[in-house]
Amino acid sequence: MVSLLVVVDEESLIHAFQKLARRRGWEFSVARSGLQAMEILDSRPYGVALVDLNMNGVSGLELLDYIR
């Protein structure tokens, strides 16, 4: 099963990815900030992370460095 972490701060994108994940039967989690994503990733691994590069606070690029 695919585990998907979506890191965005726009509700419309969250709903779109959530709908896609449900249709595909994927496990789905949301983080609305880079810092929240780091906390979630510290608790468990994900197979796929979709990351908004333009977020306030911890940027998407900083988060991708953290994930690596």
Image (tube, rainbow, N blue to C red):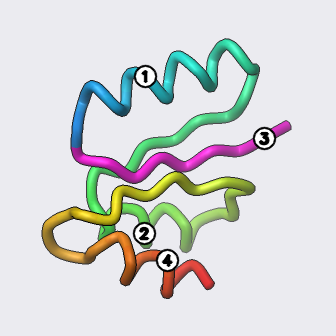
Q: CA distance from mark 1 to mark 2?
A: 23 Å
Counting residues from the start of the chain, the first of labels 2 and 4 encountered is 2
Indicate the secondary structure of the residue bearing disc 1. Answer: helix
- Amino acid residing under circle 2: Glu
Indicate the secondary structure of the residue bearing disc 2. Answer: helix
Counting residues from the start of the chain, the first of labels 3 and 4 encountered is 3
Indicate the secondary structure of the residue bearing disc 4. Answer: helix
Residue beneath the point at 49% across and 29% down: 17
Counting residues from the start of the chain, the first of labels 3 and 1 encountered is 3
Q: Nearer the viewer, mark 3 or mark 4?
A: 4
Q: CA distance from mark 3 to mark 1?
A: 17 Å
Residue 28 position by quadrant: top right
- Amino acid residing under circle 3: Val
Question: Residue under circle 2?
Answer: 39
Dot 1 surroundings within 10 Å: few (below 14), some, or many (20 or more)?
few
- Amino acid residing under circle 1: Ala
Counting residues from the start of the chain, the first of labels 1 and 2 encountered is 1
Q: Nearer the viewer, mark 3 or mark 2?
A: 3
Residue 66 lies in the magenta stretch: no
Counting residues from the start of the chain, the first of labels 3 and 2 encountered is 3
Dot 4 surroundings within 10 Å: few (below 14), some, or many (20 or more)?
some
Left/right of residue 42 with respect to residue 14 in the rendered view: right
Indicate the secondary structure of the residue bearing disc 3. Answer: loop
Dot 3 surroundings within 10 Å: few (below 14), some, or many (20 or more)?
few
Name above or below for residue 40 compared with residue 28.
Answer: below
Residues rendered magenta in the picture: 1-9
